[in-house]
Amino acid sequence: MHTLTVPPQPSSSSRVITLGGGCFWCTEAVFVRVKGVLTVTSGYSNGHTDKPSYEQVCTGTTGHNEVVQISYDASQISLRELLEIFFVIHDPTTLNRQGNDVGTQYRSGVYFQDEADQAVAQQVLDEVNQHLSGRVVTEVLPLRNYWAAEDYHQDYFAHHPDQGYCAFVVAPKVQKFLHTFADKVRDA
């Protein structure tokens, strides 16, 4: 499991949301920098295979999506704010793809654990969809069959910032977050 530099403190306001926005390396690299986020774990969800491997998920046959599971302190950041960041850092209008990453494992999705989170997710999605002229393809579904990804996927950008994909795809998403949401960046 991925942990941040600042150890998370257990809290009664701790919540969890799972988001699929393309390659989990990109999404994780952004959310580990968000104030109020306690942990971010790359993983796979909403498929039909138990404990799938990265290689299996990449075939598109397991039904899983590459996701990040975010534990956050709701007294510091709201689900709405997390979703606002999410909808800016990925393209919710492309079905089963983000940039050159193509396949059902790269679909846009918000996976909730309770009705309150479902209501917030649906409201934010409806607002984004209206803003984008009805082109949003993001699924909003209950979280099912979640599995943490292999250890080598956790903190991938932090460990491999000069790797080609990280330098040319992940880093620009991180920069976009830092620029667009400067007030949401965790203190160093």
Image: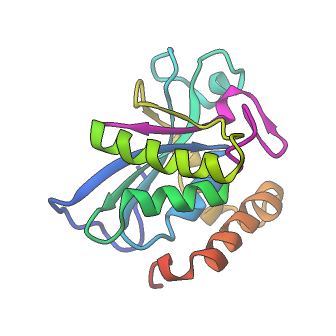
Residue 154 lies, in percent from the top left, at 53, 51
Residue 141 is at least partly visible in this image: yes
Residue 129 figure quarter: top right
Residue 139 lies, in percent from the top left, at 55, 33
Colour treatment of the image: rainbow
Residue 38 lies, in percent from the top left, at 35, 63
Residue at left 68%, top 26%? Answer: 104
Residue 27 figure quarter: bottom right
Q: Nearer the viewer, residue 127 or 145?
A: 127
**Horizontally, is 127 left or right of 99 in the view?**
left
Residue at left 70%, top 73%? Answer: 175
**Horizontally, is 181 left or right of 7 in the view?**
right
Q: Which residues are magenta?
A: 91-113
Residue at left 49%, top 51%? Answer: 124
Rendered position, 111 above or below 60: below
Q: Is residue 111 magenta?
A: yes
Q: Is residue 129 magenta?
A: no
Residue 108 lies, in percent from the top left, at 62, 39
